[in-house]
Amino acid sequence: MTPQELANLAHLRRARDLIDRDFARALDVPTMARKALMSPAHFSRQFRAAYGETPYSYLMTRRVERAMALLRGGMTVTDACMAVGCTSLGSFSSRFTELVGETPSAYRAREHSAVEAMPACVAKIRTRPARHSTGTAAGAQVSRIREAALTPAE
């Protein structure tokens, strides 16, 4: 790797850290790009090449991840949506369903005792949202596998 490529990765990490830290703030690509010392278009291309998803997609994944924790704690869907920085309940619900495989209301309503019994570091990894299609057999199977992994053995 060239010194320039290493420097670009360091700048991209700064922008990713901004997203991780300030996900609830109003963040846009130009703001993230400034943190990475790049133009917005170049930043978007470089971010996707480095992390496999667009900056906005990464931001929404972090927001959904935090919303999952808030919903497990009993917060309402609307309050969780606003707490993580989303302004549209419809867009939030659509993205949540796309990433988690079920609606925020259904996620909030189901039992989460297995997650509560795990150490926080393990729960964070096991409950991290992963993009999958819920309308396909493969998507349904992924949901069942993830659910089985979180259900305690009897």
Image: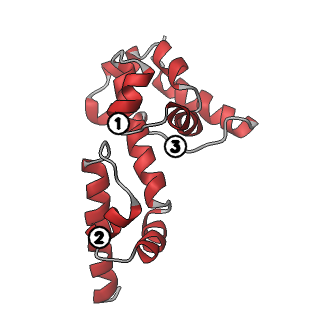
Give coordinates of residue 116: x percent, y percent: 33, 19
Residue beneath disc 3: 130
In this figure, which residue is indicated by the disc labeled 1?
84
Q: Quadrant of the N terminus?
A: bottom left
Q: Earlier in the sequence, mark 1 or mark 2?
A: 2
Comes first in the chain, label 3 or label 2: 2
Q: Residue at x 51, y 25 (%)?
A: 104
* Cβ atoms at labels 1 and 2 below 8 Å apart: no
Q: Identify the element where label 3 is drawn.
A: loop
Label 3 or label 2, whichever lies nearer to me, is: 2
Q: Which residue is mark 2?
A: 34
Check disc 3: other Cα within 10 Å, few if <14, some if 14-19, many if 20+: some
Q: Are marks 3 and 2 in contact (CB under 8 Å)?
A: no
Which tag, 1 or 3, sits closer to the chain's start?
A: 1
**x and y percentages locating residue 51 in the rendered image:** 44, 63
The reply to whether the C-beta atoms of the residues labelled 1 and 3 are less than 8 Å apart is no
Tell me which residue sits at (35%, 28%) in the image: 69
**Gap between marks 3 and 2, in whole Å?**
28 Å
Q: Residues within 10 Å of mark 2 (few under 14, many from 20)?
A: some
Query: What amino acid type is highlighted by mark number 2?
Result: Arg
What amino acid does circle 1 point to? Val
Quarter of the rendering containing residue 144: top right
Q: CA distance from mark 1 to mark 2?
A: 22 Å
- Category of crowding for the residue at label 1, using alpha-carbon neighbours closer than 10 angstroms: few (below 14), some (14–19), many (at least 20): many
* Badge 3 amino acid: Ala
Q: Is residue 49 left or right of residue 131?
A: left
Tell me which residue sits at (31%, 25%) in the image. 118
* Camera sees residue 92: yes
| Camera-nearest residue between 43 and 145 | 43
